[in-house]
Image (spheres, rainbow, N blue to C red):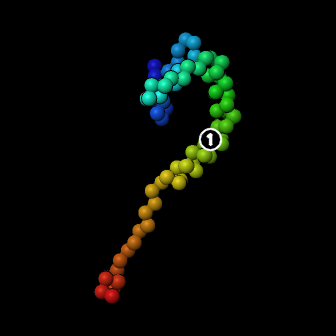
Amino acid sequence: MDAIIGKYRVRLEENGLVLGHASGINFDLTIDEAVGLMDFLNVYRQTLSAMQEDHERHTDPCLERVVISKQDEKS
C-alpha cells in the first residue's frame, strides 16, 4: 500500500522503502537505511515539530481589519 507524504509517494517493499517524487526520481532505501532515517527523524522530532509550528505561523494569512465610520467618510 502506498502513502502520500507531501510531494512524495512512499511504499514499503520486501527490500526496503521507496520514496518516489512526482518528477520521476525514486529513492530506494534498504531496510538499514530506512531504519537509520527513522532513528534520525526520532532524534529530531521535537526540533522538526517546532520548525513546523514556526513555519505555519509565518504562512498564516493575516489581514488587518479596517473599519470606516460614517464620520470619516464625510471629512
Q: Is residue 35 above or below residue 56?
A: above
Q: Which residue is mark 1?
A: 48
Q: Quadrant of the C terminus?
A: bottom left
Q: Residue furthest top?
A: 14
The mark total stands at 1
Q: Which residue: 43% across, 63% down?
A: 63
Q: Position of residue 18 (x, y in %)?
A: 53, 21
Q: Position of residue 65 (x, y in %)?
A: 41, 68
Tell me, yes or no, if residue 29 can be seen here.
yes
In the image, taking residue 25 as reference, residue 48 lies left or right, namely: right
Tell me, yes or no, if residue 3 can be seen here.
no
* Three-letter amino acid code of the residue under disc 1: Leu
Q: Which residue: 44% across, 29% down?
A: 23
Q: Is residue 48 above or below residue 8?
A: below
Q: Nearer the viewer, residue 21 or 39?
A: 21
Name the secondary structure under disc 1.
helix
Q: Quadrant of residue 30?
A: top right
Q: Position of residue 25 (x, y in %)?
A: 49, 25
**Label 1 packing within 10 angstroms: few (<14), some (14-19), many (20+):** few
Q: Which residue: 55% across, 19% down?
A: 28
Q: Which residue: 35% across, 83% down?
A: 72
Q: Nearer the viewer, residue 75 or 23?
A: 23
Q: Nearer the viewer, residue 27 or 36?
A: 27
Q: Residue furthest bottom?
A: 75
Q: Nearer the viewer, residue 50 or 30?
A: 30
